Image: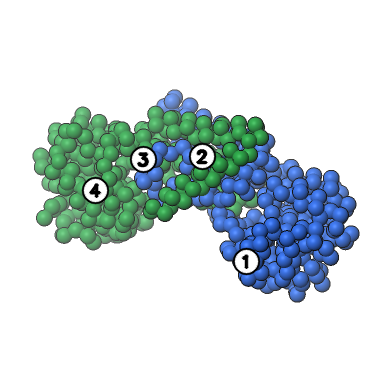
Chain colours: A green, B blue
Amino acid sequence: MWPKRISILGVGLLGGSIGLAARKFLSACEIVGYGHRPATLQAALARGAVDTVESNAAAAVAGADLVILCTPVGLFDRIIQEISPVLSATAVVTDVGSTKRSVVELAGKHLEHPERFVGSHPMAGGEVRGVEFARADLFQEAVCITTPIAQTDTQVLAKVEQFWGKLGLRLTRLSPQDHDRLIGEISHVPHAVAAALVAMQDDAALPLCGKGFLDATRIAAGDGGLWRDIFMDNQDNLRVGIGRLMGELSQLLARMENGDAEKVMAWLDAAAARRAALVKSK
Amino acid sequence: MWPKRISILGVGLLGGSIGLAARKFLSACEIVGYGHRPATLQAALARGAVDTVESNAAAAVAGADLVILCTPVGLFDRIIQEISPVLSATAVVTDVGSTKRSVVELAGKHLEHPERFVGSHPMAGGEVRGVEFARADLFQEAVCITTPIAQTDTQVLAKVEQFWGKLGLRLTRLSPQDHDRLIGEISHVPHAVAAALVAMQDDAALPLCGKGFLDATRIAAGDGGLWRDIFMDNQDNLRVGIGRLMGELSQLLARMENGDAEKVMAWLDAAAARRAALVKSK
Protein backbone atom coordinates (compact mmCIF):
# COMPACT_ATOMS: atom_id res chain seq x y z
CA MET A 1 0.00 0.00 0.00
CA TRP A 2 1.07 3.54 -0.73
CA PRO A 3 2.24 5.65 1.03
CA LYS A 4 4.51 3.75 3.37
CA ARG A 5 6.30 6.79 4.74
CA ILE A 6 4.78 10.25 4.84
CA SER A 7 6.92 13.28 5.54
CA ILE A 8 4.93 16.23 6.91
CA LEU A 9 6.93 19.44 6.70
CA GLY A 10 5.37 21.77 9.25
CA VAL A 11 3.30 20.16 12.01
CA GLY A 12 0.79 22.88 12.86
CA LEU A 13 -2.97 22.66 12.58
CA LEU A 14 -2.99 21.31 9.01
CA GLY A 15 0.14 19.17 9.21
CA GLY A 16 -0.91 17.72 12.55
CA SER A 17 -4.42 17.00 11.29
CA ILE A 18 -3.00 15.23 8.23
CA GLY A 19 -0.98 13.00 10.56
CA LEU A 20 -3.98 12.18 12.74
CA ALA A 21 -6.24 11.62 9.70
CA ALA A 22 -3.65 9.44 7.96
CA ARG A 23 -3.49 7.22 11.02
CA LYS A 24 -7.25 6.97 11.19
CA PHE A 25 -8.17 6.55 7.53
CA LEU A 26 -5.10 4.98 5.87
CA SER A 27 -3.46 1.61 6.29
CA ALA A 28 -0.42 1.65 8.53
CA CYS A 29 2.38 3.96 7.44
CA GLU A 30 5.20 5.80 9.13
CA ILE A 31 4.75 9.50 9.65
CA VAL A 32 7.73 11.82 10.01
CA GLY A 33 7.24 15.39 11.12
CA TYR A 34 9.53 18.33 10.49
CA GLY A 35 9.37 21.67 12.29
CA HIS A 36 11.86 24.27 13.39
CA ARG A 37 10.56 24.69 16.94
CA PRO A 38 11.32 21.81 19.33
CA ALA A 39 8.19 22.56 21.38
CA THR A 40 5.99 22.12 18.29
CA LEU A 41 7.66 18.81 17.44
CA GLN A 42 7.19 17.55 20.99
CA ALA A 43 3.53 18.60 20.92
CA ALA A 44 3.02 16.77 17.59
CA LEU A 45 4.56 13.63 19.07
CA ALA A 46 2.45 13.96 22.21
CA ARG A 47 -0.73 14.34 20.12
CA GLY A 48 0.20 11.20 18.21
CA ALA A 49 0.18 13.16 14.96
CA VAL A 50 3.63 11.87 13.95
CA ASP A 51 5.78 8.82 14.75
CA THR A 52 9.15 10.54 14.61
CA VAL A 53 10.37 14.10 14.30
CA GLU A 54 13.25 15.85 12.56
CA SER A 55 14.44 19.42 12.96
CA ASN A 56 16.02 19.26 9.50
CA ALA A 57 13.78 19.19 6.43
CA ALA A 58 16.23 17.17 4.31
CA ALA A 59 16.49 14.49 7.00
CA ALA A 60 12.68 14.41 7.29
CA VAL A 61 12.13 13.56 3.60
CA ALA A 62 14.78 10.85 3.32
CA GLY A 63 13.04 7.64 2.25
CA ALA A 64 9.57 9.24 2.17
CA ASP A 65 7.25 8.26 -0.67
CA LEU A 66 4.87 11.15 0.08
CA VAL A 67 6.13 14.60 1.10
CA ILE A 68 3.62 17.28 2.11
CA LEU A 69 4.66 20.91 2.55
CA CYS A 70 2.59 22.33 5.42
CA THR A 71 4.58 25.39 6.48
CA PRO A 72 3.45 28.95 5.72
CA VAL A 73 3.82 29.56 1.97
CA GLY A 74 6.60 32.10 2.58
CA LEU A 75 8.90 29.22 3.57
CA PHE A 76 8.25 27.03 0.53
CA ASP A 77 11.15 28.45 -1.49
CA ARG A 78 13.73 27.62 1.15
CA ILE A 79 12.27 24.22 2.02
CA ILE A 80 11.90 23.03 -1.57
CA GLN A 81 15.56 23.89 -2.14
CA GLU A 82 16.57 22.08 1.04
CA ILE A 83 14.73 18.84 0.26
CA SER A 84 15.39 18.77 -3.48
CA PRO A 85 18.79 16.97 -3.35
CA VAL A 86 17.53 14.36 -0.90
CA LEU A 87 14.13 13.42 -2.35
CA SER A 88 13.73 9.86 -3.55
CA ALA A 89 13.23 9.65 -7.34
CA THR A 90 9.85 8.00 -6.72
CA ALA A 91 8.66 10.43 -4.04
CA VAL A 92 5.40 12.26 -4.63
CA VAL A 93 5.43 15.87 -3.41
CA THR A 94 2.45 18.06 -2.62
CA ASP A 95 1.57 20.97 -0.32
CA VAL A 96 -1.35 22.55 1.51
CA GLY A 97 -0.70 26.21 0.72
CA SER A 98 -3.43 28.77 0.11
CA THR A 99 -1.72 30.06 -3.05
CA LYS A 100 -0.69 27.83 -5.93
CA ARG A 101 1.10 29.67 -8.75
CA SER A 102 4.27 30.27 -6.76
CA VAL A 103 4.68 26.77 -5.34
CA VAL A 104 4.09 25.16 -8.74
CA GLU A 105 6.73 27.49 -10.16
CA LEU A 106 9.17 26.69 -7.35
CA ALA A 107 8.66 22.95 -7.87
CA GLY A 108 9.38 23.40 -11.59
CA LYS A 109 12.49 25.38 -10.83
CA HIS A 110 14.07 23.38 -8.01
CA LEU A 111 12.83 19.78 -8.08
CA GLU A 112 14.61 17.16 -10.14
CA HIS A 113 11.21 15.59 -10.93
CA PRO A 114 8.73 18.45 -11.08
CA GLU A 115 6.27 16.11 -12.80
CA ARG A 116 5.96 14.35 -9.43
CA PHE A 117 4.77 17.51 -7.72
CA VAL A 118 1.03 18.36 -7.48
CA GLY A 119 -0.17 21.56 -5.84
CA SER A 120 -2.98 20.99 -3.34
CA HIS A 121 -5.17 23.28 -1.29
CA PRO A 122 -7.29 21.44 1.27
CA MET A 123 -9.68 24.18 2.40
CA ALA A 124 -9.96 23.48 6.10
CA GLY A 125 -8.57 24.99 9.24
CA GLY A 126 -10.09 28.30 10.09
CA GLU A 127 -8.82 30.81 12.60
CA VAL A 128 -7.05 28.61 15.13
CA ARG A 129 -3.46 27.52 14.70
CA GLY A 130 -1.16 24.97 16.24
CA VAL A 131 -1.04 21.20 16.50
CA GLU A 132 -3.06 21.38 19.74
CA PHE A 133 -6.13 22.08 17.58
CA ALA A 134 -5.35 19.29 15.09
CA ARG A 135 -8.16 16.78 14.53
CA ALA A 136 -8.41 13.60 12.45
CA ASP A 137 -11.79 14.79 11.13
CA LEU A 138 -10.69 18.33 10.19
CA PHE A 139 -11.00 17.52 6.48
CA GLN A 140 -14.38 15.78 6.44
CA GLU A 141 -16.54 17.26 3.67
CA ALA A 142 -14.11 20.12 3.03
CA VAL A 143 -13.02 20.92 -0.54
CA CYS A 144 -9.50 20.15 -1.76
CA ILE A 145 -8.36 21.90 -4.91
CA THR A 146 -5.52 20.27 -6.85
CA THR A 147 -3.66 22.33 -9.44
CA PRO A 148 -1.98 19.99 -11.93
CA ILE A 149 -0.22 21.48 -14.95
CA ALA A 150 0.52 19.99 -18.38
CA GLN A 151 3.77 18.40 -17.15
CA THR A 152 2.20 16.74 -14.10
CA ASP A 153 2.42 12.94 -14.09
CA THR A 154 -1.19 11.75 -14.24
CA GLN A 155 -0.47 8.77 -12.00
CA VAL A 156 1.05 11.05 -9.41
CA LEU A 157 -2.03 13.29 -9.63
CA ALA A 158 -4.29 10.27 -9.13
CA LYS A 159 -2.28 9.17 -6.08
CA VAL A 160 -2.43 12.62 -4.48
CA GLU A 161 -6.16 12.94 -5.12
CA GLN A 162 -6.80 9.48 -3.70
CA PHE A 163 -4.82 10.40 -0.62
CA TRP A 164 -6.90 13.54 0.04
CA GLY A 165 -10.09 11.66 -0.75
CA LYS A 166 -9.30 9.09 1.94
CA LEU A 167 -8.85 11.91 4.44
CA GLY A 168 -12.44 12.97 3.70
CA LEU A 169 -11.92 15.83 1.24
CA ARG A 170 -14.04 16.47 -1.86
CA LEU A 171 -11.74 17.05 -4.83
CA THR A 172 -11.83 19.63 -7.54
CA ARG A 173 -9.17 20.70 -10.07
CA LEU A 174 -8.14 24.17 -11.22
CA SER A 175 -5.14 25.63 -12.99
CA PRO A 176 -2.78 27.39 -10.55
CA GLN A 177 -3.84 30.70 -12.17
CA ASP A 178 -7.58 30.09 -11.80
CA HIS A 179 -7.03 28.86 -8.26
CA ASP A 180 -5.26 32.01 -7.18
CA ARG A 181 -7.79 34.27 -8.89
CA LEU A 182 -10.92 32.54 -7.55
CA ILE A 183 -9.56 31.86 -4.07
CA GLY A 184 -8.30 35.44 -4.04
CA GLU A 185 -11.91 36.55 -4.49
CA ILE A 186 -13.69 34.14 -2.20
CA SER A 187 -11.10 33.89 0.57
CA HIS A 188 -8.26 36.44 0.48
CA VAL A 189 -10.37 39.53 -0.27
CA PRO A 190 -12.88 38.66 2.50
CA HIS A 191 -9.96 38.23 4.89
CA ALA A 192 -8.50 41.64 4.02
CA VAL A 193 -11.96 43.20 4.31
CA ALA A 194 -12.59 41.62 7.72
CA ALA A 195 -9.30 43.03 9.02
CA ALA A 196 -10.16 46.45 7.54
CA LEU A 197 -13.60 46.38 9.19
CA VAL A 198 -11.94 45.88 12.56
CA ALA A 199 -9.16 48.40 11.89
CA MET A 200 -11.51 51.22 10.81
CA GLN A 201 -13.63 51.23 13.98
CA ASP A 202 -13.63 54.02 16.54
CA ASP A 203 -12.88 52.71 20.01
CA ALA A 204 -16.33 54.03 20.95
CA ALA A 205 -18.05 51.84 18.36
CA LEU A 206 -16.61 48.52 19.53
CA PRO A 207 -18.74 48.07 22.69
CA LEU A 208 -21.84 48.48 20.48
CA CYS A 209 -20.97 45.56 18.25
CA GLY A 210 -23.39 42.70 17.92
CA LYS A 211 -23.16 39.09 16.79
CA GLY A 212 -23.31 40.25 13.17
CA PHE A 213 -20.05 42.17 13.44
CA LEU A 214 -18.31 39.30 15.24
CA ASP A 215 -19.40 36.86 12.54
CA ALA A 216 -18.42 39.23 9.75
CA THR A 217 -14.91 39.64 11.16
CA ARG A 218 -14.24 36.12 12.47
CA ILE A 219 -11.81 35.31 9.65
CA ALA A 220 -9.69 38.30 10.74
CA ALA A 221 -8.76 36.26 13.83
CA GLY A 222 -6.39 34.19 11.67
CA ASP A 223 -2.62 34.19 12.10
CA GLY A 224 -0.97 37.38 10.80
CA GLY A 225 2.22 35.72 9.60
CA LEU A 226 0.39 33.07 7.62
CA TRP A 227 -1.84 35.66 5.95
CA ARG A 228 1.01 38.09 5.28
CA ASP A 229 2.62 35.35 3.20
CA ILE A 230 -0.64 34.65 1.35
CA PHE A 231 -1.31 38.34 0.68
CA MET A 232 2.23 39.04 -0.54
CA ASP A 233 2.12 35.98 -2.79
CA ASN A 234 -1.32 36.68 -4.27
CA GLN A 235 -0.93 40.44 -4.41
CA ASP A 236 -2.09 40.92 -8.00
CA ASN A 237 -5.34 39.03 -7.49
CA LEU A 238 -5.96 40.74 -4.17
CA ARG A 239 -5.58 44.08 -5.91
CA VAL A 240 -8.08 43.18 -8.63
CA GLY A 241 -10.53 41.73 -6.09
CA ILE A 242 -10.36 44.72 -3.76
CA GLY A 243 -10.88 46.95 -6.79
CA ARG A 244 -14.06 45.04 -7.63
CA LEU A 245 -15.29 45.29 -4.07
CA MET A 246 -14.65 49.03 -4.08
CA GLY A 247 -16.50 49.25 -7.38
CA GLU A 248 -19.58 47.62 -5.82
CA LEU A 249 -19.43 49.98 -2.84
CA SER A 250 -18.90 53.05 -5.02
CA GLN A 251 -21.92 52.07 -7.09
CA LEU A 252 -23.96 51.70 -3.90
CA LEU A 253 -22.92 55.17 -2.73
CA ALA A 254 -23.76 56.65 -6.15
CA ARG A 255 -27.22 55.07 -6.10
CA MET A 256 -27.86 56.43 -2.62
CA GLU A 257 -26.68 59.88 -3.64
CA ASN A 258 -29.06 59.77 -6.61
CA GLY A 259 -31.89 58.81 -4.26
CA ASP A 260 -32.29 55.56 -6.19
CA ALA A 261 -33.66 53.59 -3.24
CA GLU A 262 -35.17 50.87 -5.41
CA LYS A 263 -31.81 50.04 -7.01
CA VAL A 264 -30.25 49.92 -3.54
CA MET A 265 -32.90 47.43 -2.48
CA ALA A 266 -32.51 45.37 -5.65
CA TRP A 267 -28.75 45.15 -5.05
CA LEU A 268 -29.27 44.09 -1.42
CA ASP A 269 -31.94 41.55 -2.36
CA ALA A 270 -29.78 40.10 -5.13
CA ALA A 271 -26.88 39.62 -2.71
CA ALA A 272 -29.17 38.02 -0.12
CA ALA A 273 -30.65 35.68 -2.75
CA ARG A 274 -27.23 34.74 -4.13
CA ARG A 275 -25.97 33.93 -0.66
CA ALA A 276 -29.12 31.94 0.17
CA ALA A 277 -28.63 29.82 -2.98
CA LEU A 278 -25.02 29.25 -1.97
CA VAL A 279 -25.99 28.12 1.54
CA LYS A 280 -28.57 25.78 0.03
CA SER A 281 -26.00 24.24 -2.32
CA LYS A 282 -23.66 23.37 0.55
CA MET B 1 -48.28 49.49 37.12
CA TRP B 2 -47.14 51.07 33.90
CA PRO B 3 -47.69 50.36 31.05
CA LYS B 4 -51.30 49.19 31.07
CA ARG B 5 -51.74 49.26 27.33
CA ILE B 6 -48.90 48.86 24.85
CA SER B 7 -49.37 49.68 21.20
CA ILE B 8 -46.89 47.87 18.93
CA LEU B 9 -46.84 49.43 15.48
CA GLY B 10 -45.42 46.76 13.20
CA VAL B 11 -45.61 43.17 14.43
CA GLY B 12 -42.63 41.54 12.73
CA LEU B 13 -39.66 39.93 14.42
CA LEU B 14 -38.96 42.83 16.79
CA GLY B 15 -42.54 43.94 17.42
CA GLY B 16 -43.67 40.36 17.96
CA SER B 17 -40.77 39.64 20.30
CA ILE B 18 -41.60 42.76 22.32
CA GLY B 19 -45.15 41.47 22.72
CA LEU B 20 -43.98 38.02 23.83
CA ALA B 21 -41.34 39.47 26.16
CA ALA B 22 -43.81 41.99 27.67
CA ARG B 23 -46.15 39.12 28.53
CA LYS B 24 -43.37 37.12 30.08
CA PHE B 25 -41.46 39.80 31.99
CA LEU B 26 -44.03 42.52 32.76
CA SER B 27 -47.11 42.54 34.94
CA ALA B 28 -50.34 42.08 33.01
CA CYS B 29 -51.03 44.67 30.34
CA GLU B 30 -52.99 44.80 27.13
CA ILE B 31 -51.03 44.59 23.92
CA VAL B 32 -52.40 46.02 20.68
CA GLY B 33 -50.69 45.25 17.41
CA TYR B 34 -50.85 47.26 14.20
CA GLY B 35 -49.78 46.04 10.79
CA HIS B 36 -50.90 46.58 7.23
CA ARG B 37 -51.01 42.95 6.17
CA PRO B 38 -53.91 40.90 7.58
CA ALA B 39 -51.82 37.71 7.43
CA THR B 40 -49.16 39.25 9.66
CA LEU B 41 -51.74 40.39 12.18
CA GLN B 42 -53.30 36.94 12.26
CA ALA B 43 -49.89 35.36 12.75
CA ALA B 44 -49.13 37.77 15.62
CA LEU B 45 -52.42 36.83 17.29
CA ALA B 46 -51.78 33.15 16.74
CA ARG B 47 -48.29 33.45 18.29
CA GLY B 48 -49.83 35.18 21.30
CA ALA B 49 -47.63 38.23 20.70
CA VAL B 50 -50.61 40.62 20.85
CA ASP B 51 -54.09 40.60 22.42
CA THR B 52 -55.89 42.57 19.74
CA VAL B 53 -54.99 43.86 16.30
CA GLU B 54 -55.77 46.97 14.29
CA SER B 55 -55.15 47.65 10.61
CA ASN B 56 -55.16 51.38 11.31
CA ALA B 57 -52.27 52.95 13.23
CA ALA B 58 -54.39 55.72 14.77
CA ALA B 59 -56.89 53.19 16.11
CA ALA B 60 -54.03 51.09 17.50
CA VAL B 61 -52.64 53.91 19.66
CA ALA B 62 -55.95 55.10 21.12
CA GLY B 63 -55.71 54.78 24.91
CA ALA B 64 -52.17 53.37 24.82
CA ASP B 65 -49.74 54.59 27.49
CA LEU B 66 -46.75 53.14 25.60
CA VAL B 67 -46.45 53.28 21.82
CA ILE B 68 -43.54 51.53 20.10
CA LEU B 69 -42.77 52.09 16.42
CA CYS B 70 -41.53 48.77 15.02
CA THR B 71 -42.01 49.19 11.27
CA PRO B 72 -39.12 49.74 8.85
CA VAL B 73 -37.70 53.23 9.44
CA GLY B 74 -38.89 54.36 6.00
CA LEU B 75 -42.49 54.27 7.30
CA PHE B 76 -41.89 56.33 10.45
CA ASP B 77 -42.74 59.66 8.80
CA ARG B 78 -46.16 58.53 7.68
CA ILE B 79 -47.00 56.64 10.89
CA ILE B 80 -45.94 59.43 13.24
CA GLN B 81 -48.19 61.80 11.32
CA GLU B 82 -51.06 59.31 11.48
CA ILE B 83 -50.87 58.70 15.21
CA SER B 84 -50.03 62.25 16.28
CA PRO B 85 -53.65 63.58 16.52
CA VAL B 86 -54.85 60.51 18.45
CA LEU B 87 -52.05 60.01 21.01
CA SER B 88 -53.01 60.42 24.66
CA ALA B 89 -51.28 63.41 26.26
CA THR B 90 -49.67 61.04 28.75
CA ALA B 91 -48.54 58.45 26.21
CA VAL B 92 -44.86 57.61 26.02
CA VAL B 93 -43.60 57.00 22.48
CA THR B 94 -40.47 55.14 21.42
CA ASP B 95 -39.24 53.08 18.47
CA VAL B 96 -36.84 50.27 17.59
CA GLY B 97 -35.30 51.72 14.43
CA SER B 98 -31.65 51.23 13.44
CA THR B 99 -31.20 54.95 12.72
CA LYS B 100 -32.03 57.66 15.23
CA ARG B 101 -31.49 61.21 13.91
CA SER B 102 -34.44 61.10 11.53
CA VAL B 103 -36.99 59.64 13.95
CA VAL B 104 -36.03 62.11 16.70
CA GLU B 105 -36.47 64.90 14.17
CA LEU B 106 -39.83 63.54 13.01
CA ALA B 107 -41.04 63.30 16.61
CA GLY B 108 -39.99 66.91 17.21
CA LYS B 109 -41.80 68.02 14.07
CA HIS B 110 -45.05 66.09 14.28
CA LEU B 111 -45.79 65.12 17.89
CA GLU B 112 -47.69 67.43 20.18
CA HIS B 113 -45.47 66.28 23.07
CA PRO B 114 -42.06 65.55 21.56
CA GLU B 115 -40.61 65.56 25.09
CA ARG B 116 -42.49 62.28 25.60
CA PHE B 117 -40.64 60.62 22.72
CA VAL B 118 -37.38 58.70 23.30
CA GLY B 119 -35.50 57.10 20.45
CA SER B 120 -34.48 53.47 21.16
CA HIS B 121 -32.41 50.92 19.31
CA PRO B 122 -32.60 47.45 20.83
CA MET B 123 -29.81 45.64 18.97
CA ALA B 124 -31.29 42.23 18.45
CA GLY B 125 -32.86 40.39 15.59
CA GLY B 126 -30.34 39.31 13.01
CA GLU B 127 -31.08 38.05 9.53
CA VAL B 128 -34.49 36.45 9.94
CA ARG B 129 -37.70 38.43 9.69
CA GLY B 130 -41.34 37.92 10.55
CA VAL B 131 -43.35 37.28 13.67
CA GLU B 132 -42.88 33.52 13.20
CA PHE B 133 -39.31 33.99 14.45
CA ALA B 134 -40.35 36.18 17.39
CA ARG B 135 -39.14 35.00 20.82
CA ALA B 136 -39.69 36.28 24.35
CA ASP B 137 -35.95 35.93 25.00
CA LEU B 138 -34.76 37.71 21.85
CA PHE B 139 -33.51 40.66 23.89
CA GLN B 140 -31.68 38.84 26.68
CA GLU B 141 -28.21 40.37 27.12
CA ALA B 142 -28.49 42.47 23.95
CA VAL B 143 -27.63 46.16 24.03
CA CYS B 144 -30.33 48.84 23.78
CA ILE B 145 -29.21 52.34 22.89
CA THR B 146 -31.51 55.19 23.89
CA THR B 147 -31.01 58.60 22.27
CA PRO B 148 -32.55 61.29 24.51
CA ILE B 149 -32.08 64.93 23.55
CA ALA B 150 -32.09 68.07 25.71
CA GLN B 151 -35.88 68.40 25.47
CA THR B 152 -36.60 64.80 26.49
CA ASP B 153 -38.62 64.43 29.70
CA THR B 154 -36.30 62.64 32.13
CA GLN B 155 -39.14 60.69 33.71
CA VAL B 156 -40.20 59.48 30.29
CA LEU B 157 -36.62 58.46 29.57
CA ALA B 158 -36.48 56.54 32.87
CA LYS B 159 -39.72 54.74 32.05
CA VAL B 160 -38.55 53.72 28.59
CA GLU B 161 -35.21 52.49 29.90
CA GLN B 162 -36.91 50.54 32.68
CA PHE B 163 -39.18 48.93 30.11
CA TRP B 164 -36.26 47.75 27.95
CA GLY B 165 -34.37 46.65 31.04
CA LYS B 166 -37.24 44.38 32.08
CA LEU B 167 -37.16 42.79 28.63
CA GLY B 168 -33.54 41.81 29.29
CA LEU B 169 -31.63 44.54 27.43
CA ARG B 170 -28.50 46.27 28.70
CA LEU B 171 -28.91 50.02 28.33
CA THR B 172 -26.58 52.66 27.02
CA ARG B 173 -27.21 56.27 25.94
CA LEU B 174 -25.93 58.18 22.95
CA SER B 175 -26.91 61.35 21.15
CA PRO B 176 -28.85 60.61 17.93
CA GLN B 177 -25.79 61.89 16.00
CA ASP B 178 -23.28 59.67 17.80
CA HIS B 179 -25.64 56.72 17.48
CA ASP B 180 -25.91 57.04 13.73
CA ARG B 181 -22.19 57.57 13.28
CA LEU B 182 -21.06 54.68 15.51
CA ILE B 183 -23.76 52.25 14.43
CA GLY B 184 -23.03 53.28 10.86
CA GLU B 185 -19.48 52.04 11.39
CA ILE B 186 -20.09 48.89 13.39
CA SER B 187 -23.30 47.73 11.70
CA HIS B 188 -24.27 49.51 8.47
CA VAL B 189 -20.83 49.51 6.84
CA PRO B 190 -20.29 45.78 7.60
CA HIS B 191 -23.71 45.08 6.07
CA ALA B 192 -22.88 46.97 2.88
CA VAL B 193 -19.51 45.23 2.72
CA ALA B 194 -21.04 41.77 3.18
CA ALA B 195 -23.45 42.42 0.31
CA ALA B 196 -20.57 43.72 -1.84
CA LEU B 197 -18.49 40.60 -1.04
CA VAL B 198 -21.30 38.43 -2.36
CA ALA B 199 -22.03 40.68 -5.36
CA MET B 200 -18.41 40.81 -6.56
CA GLN B 201 -17.91 37.04 -6.83
CA ASP B 202 -17.49 35.17 -10.09
CA ASP B 203 -20.01 32.37 -10.39
CA ALA B 204 -16.99 30.04 -10.57
CA ALA B 205 -15.73 31.19 -7.15
CA LEU B 206 -18.93 30.45 -5.22
CA PRO B 207 -18.63 26.63 -5.09
CA LEU B 208 -15.17 27.10 -3.54
CA CYS B 209 -16.44 29.09 -0.60
CA GLY B 210 -15.79 27.84 2.90
CA LYS B 211 -17.30 28.49 6.29
CA GLY B 212 -15.28 31.69 6.56
CA PHE B 213 -17.02 33.27 3.59
CA LEU B 214 -20.46 32.21 4.81
CA ASP B 215 -19.77 33.71 8.25
CA ALA B 216 -18.35 36.90 6.76
CA THR B 217 -21.45 37.43 4.62
CA ARG B 218 -24.18 36.19 6.97
CA ILE B 219 -25.44 39.70 7.71
CA ALA B 220 -26.08 40.16 3.97
CA ALA B 221 -28.95 37.68 4.36
CA GLY B 222 -31.02 40.44 5.99
CA ASP B 223 -34.17 41.90 4.44
CA GLY B 224 -33.43 44.23 1.51
CA GLY B 225 -36.31 46.62 2.16
CA LEU B 226 -35.41 47.10 5.79
CA TRP B 227 -31.77 47.78 4.93
CA ARG B 228 -32.59 50.03 1.98
CA ASP B 229 -34.42 52.30 4.46
CA ILE B 230 -31.48 52.23 6.89
CA PHE B 231 -28.93 52.93 4.16
CA MET B 232 -30.92 55.79 2.64
CA ASP B 233 -31.47 57.30 6.08
CA ASN B 234 -27.86 57.01 7.25
CA GLN B 235 -26.31 57.78 3.89
CA ASP B 236 -23.80 60.38 5.11
CA ASN B 237 -22.32 58.13 7.80
CA LEU B 238 -22.27 55.17 5.44
CA ARG B 239 -20.29 57.27 2.98
CA VAL B 240 -17.73 58.30 5.60
CA GLY B 241 -17.46 54.74 6.93
CA ILE B 242 -17.01 53.17 3.49
CA GLY B 243 -14.39 55.83 2.78
CA ARG B 244 -12.48 54.78 5.88
CA LEU B 245 -12.73 51.11 4.93
CA MET B 246 -11.42 51.91 1.45
CA GLY B 247 -8.61 53.88 3.08
CA GLU B 248 -7.56 50.84 5.11
CA LEU B 249 -7.63 48.63 2.02
CA SER B 250 -5.74 51.17 -0.11
CA GLN B 251 -3.06 51.38 2.55
CA LEU B 252 -2.82 47.57 2.59
CA LEU B 253 -2.39 47.49 -1.19
CA ALA B 254 0.25 50.23 -1.03
CA ARG B 255 2.21 48.32 1.62
CA MET B 256 2.08 45.16 -0.47
CA GLU B 257 3.21 47.05 -3.56
CA ASN B 258 6.16 48.44 -1.60
CA GLY B 259 7.04 44.91 -0.48
CA ASP B 260 6.50 45.97 3.12
CA ALA B 261 5.53 42.53 4.36
CA GLU B 262 6.21 43.35 8.01
CA LYS B 263 3.74 46.25 7.99
CA VAL B 264 1.15 43.99 6.35
CA MET B 265 1.65 41.48 9.15
CA ALA B 266 1.52 44.17 11.84
CA TRP B 267 -1.79 45.44 10.42
CA LEU B 268 -3.24 41.91 10.33
CA ASP B 269 -2.00 41.11 13.83
CA ALA B 270 -3.39 44.38 15.22
CA ALA B 271 -6.82 43.63 13.73
CA ALA B 272 -6.76 40.07 15.11
CA ALA B 273 -5.74 41.34 18.57
CA ARG B 274 -8.38 44.08 18.57
CA ARG B 275 -11.07 41.59 17.63
CA ALA B 276 -9.86 39.09 20.27
CA ALA B 277 -10.08 41.80 22.97
CA LEU B 278 -13.60 42.61 21.78
CA VAL B 279 -14.70 38.96 21.93
CA LYS B 280 -13.23 38.70 25.44
CA SER B 281 -15.13 41.81 26.60
CA LYS B 282 -18.47 40.34 25.53
Mark 2 crowdedness (10 Å alpha carbons): few <14, some 14-19, many ≥20? many
- Residue at the spot 76% in from the left edge and 48% down from the top edge: B78
Chain letter, disc 4 residue? A
Say what amino acid the circle numbered 1 marks: Ala
In the picture provided, is A256 more to the left or to the right than B197?
Answer: right
- Residue at the spot 23% in from the left edge and 61% down from the top edge: A24
Residue B204 badge: 3
Residue A139 locus on image (x, y percent): 31, 54
Sequence-wise, the earlier of marks 2 and 1 is 1
Name the foreground residue: B277 vs A195: A195
Say what amino acid the circle numbered 2 marks: Ala
Asked if the residue under mark 2 is in contact with the one under mark 4, i.e. CB atoms within 8 Å, the reply is: no
Q: Which residue is mark 2?
A: B196
In the picture provided, is A140 more to the left or to the right than B128?
Answer: left
Residue B189 locus on image (x, y percent): 59, 41
Sequence-wise, the earlier of marks 3 and 1 is 1
Q: Which residue is mark 4?
A: A8
Question: Do callouts 4 and 2 point to residues on the same chain?
Answer: no
Asked if the residue under mark 4 is in contact with the one under mark 3, i.e. CB atoms within 8 Å, the reply is: no
Say what amino acid the circle numbered 3 marks: Ala
Mark 4 crowdedness (10 Å alpha carbons): few <14, some 14-19, many ≥20? many
